Image: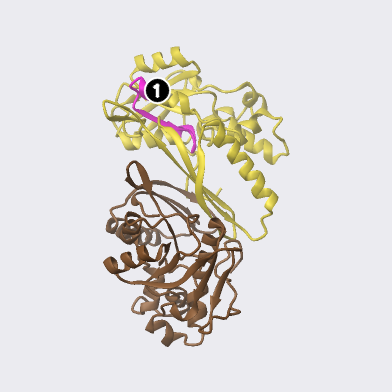
Chain colours: A yellow, B brown
Amino acid sequence: MGGEPLFALVTLALSPSTGVEAVDQLYAGLTQCAEQYHVSVAGGDIVSAPNPAITIALIGRAQTRDGAPLLLRRDAARSGDAIAVTGTLGDSAAGLRRLREGANLSDALVRAHLRPVPHVALAAEAARLGITCAIDVSDGLLQDIGHICEMSGVGARIRASSIALSEELRRAYPDEALELACTGGEDYQLVLVGAADRIALLHRENGALTVIGEVVAGDRHVALLDDAGLEMPLEAAGWDHLRAR
Amino acid sequence: MGGEPLFALVTLALSPSTGVEAVDQLYAGLTQCAEQYHVSVAGGDIVSAPNPAITIALIGRAQTRDGAPLLLRRDAARSGDAIAVTGTLGDSAAGLRRLREGANLSDALVRAHLRPVPHVALAAEAARLGITCAIDVSDGLLQDIGHICEMSGVGARIRASSIALSEELRRAYPDEALELACTGGEDYQLVLVGAADRIALLHRENGALTVIGEVVAGDRHVALLDDAGLEMPLEAAGWDHLRAR
């Protein structure tokens, strides 16, 4: 992460019963998002399949400094690093529930699910400021931080009370807001991991970052802590890529 | 086409019942092919789905001359160009039939289906020699030539008797060999379209090209001609991307 997106290859697996109108609408949404980020839909494929599938490969260019690429990777977390997150979490998972209950795009949570905003410029700015570790929240906050711990060989301590929850989420699902924020996927907020002073600098220059914890040495465990600093039993369930939902 | 492949992004949609061994075998095959062509499997994704789907995005680099990319495109056919094909056609479609009849990799037709050989070096050489139009046979010979006609705004005349058929294909399906060669997909042979002298030069230097017809002005029709020069009724069916098989 941290590069400039340039080209998208779109592969559609469509069932013979898929209507042309649905495909047109899909492409209208794709095109709208691609234009916003100056991405060209440059190719792809269409195949027939019993169930629909959409695969998008995004190709971009890394910024460089002295010839070396400035990128945000999963394997660059170091003990003592601060862990920060953009925006609020859990809104997308809550929006999916609302959608299933019949809500539409007039609902802010539904918009968070159907119109997530990728933090392209902020990721590039983080890379320019010397931050080297990040992931976006697609599987769920704790699981995605777990990916960083796994790849970096470190652990993480996350303060539950620091996780930013939206007013809409608290109102809609007051009893489950924290769980949705910790395990709900597809928020596409950025988790940024780096030296506390660089995270603070990025926050001062760009705003909207919340520090939620820090990287610790030792095993690759992600601990969610309550206000007393005790580990909470909430499981890091999130989205398991191979589990049927 | 005509570039150097560098990186592959592999997205697997797997059902929860898919065995780890099957995925290991799939990756063994992917890795074997990638190594042969010096391609790195650089990333991708895994998701759960009711039916399996494999999407591979291949990223490469074009050769350049005086800063301009040397590429083979679908929209560069000109009236009077020769149409040539590598190898033999129809073997892959016949191999799929044999596979369904219980044959295995000891059968040359099955190998043509399961182990197609991409003509990477030949495509690059064609581009260096100034040929600018090509397609690989994935949908079926006549349909793929139709894609070139569509994109280039030309027609094509193909001599049925010039289409190279393998001994194995003739032996296995004598009555359907020509139809399989014209409409069977996934041979991944190259259709090269260009000035006759350049096609001849490529053939002299690299061999294994068969000239099967020529590009004509006018409507975008692909005509398959018999020995008397009369159009044959064989439909350009091939593989329709959105038709259930």
What type is the residue that disc 1 sits on? Ala
- Depth order, front residue of A93/B224: B224
The spot of residue A219 in percent (x, y) is: 30, 33
Residue found 59% across the figure and 67% down from its top:
B221
Extreme top residue here?
A204
Q: Find disc 1 in the rendering and name its residue.
A: A126
The magenta stretch spans which residues?
A127-142
Q: Is residue A29 magenta?
A: no
Left or right position of B176 against B64: right
> In the rendered view of the protein, which quadrant contains the N terminus of chain B?
bottom left
Report if residue B118 is visible in the image: no
Viewer-nearest residue: B125 or A78? B125
Between B64 and B54, which is closer to the camera in this rendering? B64
Image coordinates of residue B184 in percent, x first then y, are 50, 73
Where is residue B36 shown, x and y percent of the image? Answer: 28, 59
Question: In percent of the image, x 54 and y 59: which residue is there?
Answer: B51
